[in-house]
Image (spheres, rainbow, N blue to C red):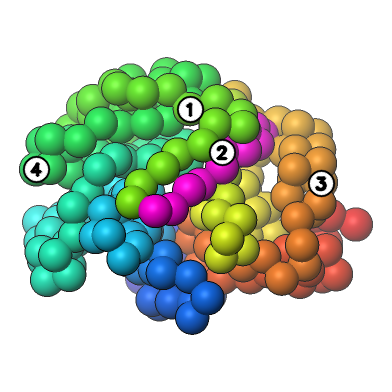
């Protein structure tokens, strides 16, 4: 257990680890969260009434995790259309190849994090984490881009600092963001990894996320959900 905790804290700052599925009555977008791999990473499946879905941060590393994701998609009769990657760190991408090859769908991410994907096998070895080489991005996401699936839309915010290519996905209709490792419950992503910058991260959070309505729900890359309002009021890094 101590080894697992050390691995988690070596990569990110997190709070309590939980699992959930959320559905809002005023929108047909459903958010399903899985907790995968030794880093306790949150993988999200977003889908709507059309059955189309996107998979955000494919963290499924072990066979049983891959089966769990695949079974959920099959049981709910979903049609995956795209893999979205918030950033290229090892814990958020080990299932990219599996999902891409299973569903024949493209991977989309910011170009600035491609170097992290390219080095994932060597980087994983430093953690004793044997990760296959992962595919390069098929599509590039830039600040302000709109990603569509079914009847739903996500707006991409480029918020570097935890990594140079970190992307946050915002659903305006349902008022939630998928924040990756940019923002956590009471904390922020670490900034001492390659390409990280504390000043850049804080600036991006304040200029792009804290301007959103207080009620916006934040789905984090690790740990529990929070809201923009709660982080404005209580996050010690954002004072």
Does residue 128 appear to the left or right of 234 in the view shown? left
Please report whichever mark, 2 or 4, sits nearer to the chain's N-terminal start.
4
Cα distance between the residues tagged 1 and 2: 7 Å
Does residue 226 appear to the left or right of 66 in the view shown? right
Per the image, is 153 magenta? yes
- Give SS at disc 2: strand
The residue under label 2 is 156
Q: Residue at x 20, y 35 (%)?
A: 105
Expressed as whole percent of the image width and height from the top left, the position of residue 172 reads 61, 56
Cα distance between the residues tagged 1 and 3: 21 Å
Q: Splitting the image into 4 quarters, where does residue 190 fall?
A: top right
Cα distance between the residues tagged 3 and 2: 16 Å
Q: Are marks 1 and 4 in contact (CB under 8 Å)?
A: no
The residue under label 1 is 141
- Give SS at disc 3: helix
The residue under label 4 is 102
Please name whichever residue, 92 or 70, is drawn nearer the observer in this view of the structure.
70
Which disc, if any, is residue 206?
Answer: 3
Number of other residues with Cα within 10 Å of mark 3, as a class: few under 14, some 14 to 19, many 20 or more? some
Q: Residue at x 62, y 38 (%)?
A: 157
């Amino acid at each position: 257990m101590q080894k697992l905790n050390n691995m988690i804290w070596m990569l990110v700052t997190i709070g309590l680890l939980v699992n959930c599925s959320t559905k809002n009555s005023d929108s047909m977008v459903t958010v399903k969260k899985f907790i995968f791999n030794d880093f306790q990473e949150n993988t999200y499946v977003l889908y709507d009434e059309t059955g189309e879905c996107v998979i955000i941060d494919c963290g499924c590393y072990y066979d049983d995790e891959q089966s769990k994701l695949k079974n959920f998609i099959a049981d709910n009769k979903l049609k995956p259309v795209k893999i979205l990657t918030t950033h290229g760190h090892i814990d958020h991408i080990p299932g990219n190849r599996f999902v891409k090859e299973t569903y024949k769908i493209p991977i989309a991410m910011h170009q600035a994090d491609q170097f992290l994907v390219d080095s994932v096998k060597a980087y994983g070895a430093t953690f004793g984490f044997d990760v296959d080489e992962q595919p390069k991005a098929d599509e590039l996401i830039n600040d302000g881009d709109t990603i569509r699936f079914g009847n739903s839309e996500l707006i991409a915010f480029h918020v570097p600092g935890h990594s140079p290519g970190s992307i946050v996905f915002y659903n305006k209709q349902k008022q939630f963001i998928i924040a990756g490792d940019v923002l956590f419950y009471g904390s922020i992503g670490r900034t001492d990894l390659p390409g990280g910058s504390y000043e850049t991260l804080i600036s991006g959070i304040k200029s792009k996320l804290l301007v959103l309505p207080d009620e916006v729900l934040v789905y984090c890359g690790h740990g529990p959900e929070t809201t923009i309002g709660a982080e404005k009021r209580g996050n010690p890094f954002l004072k």
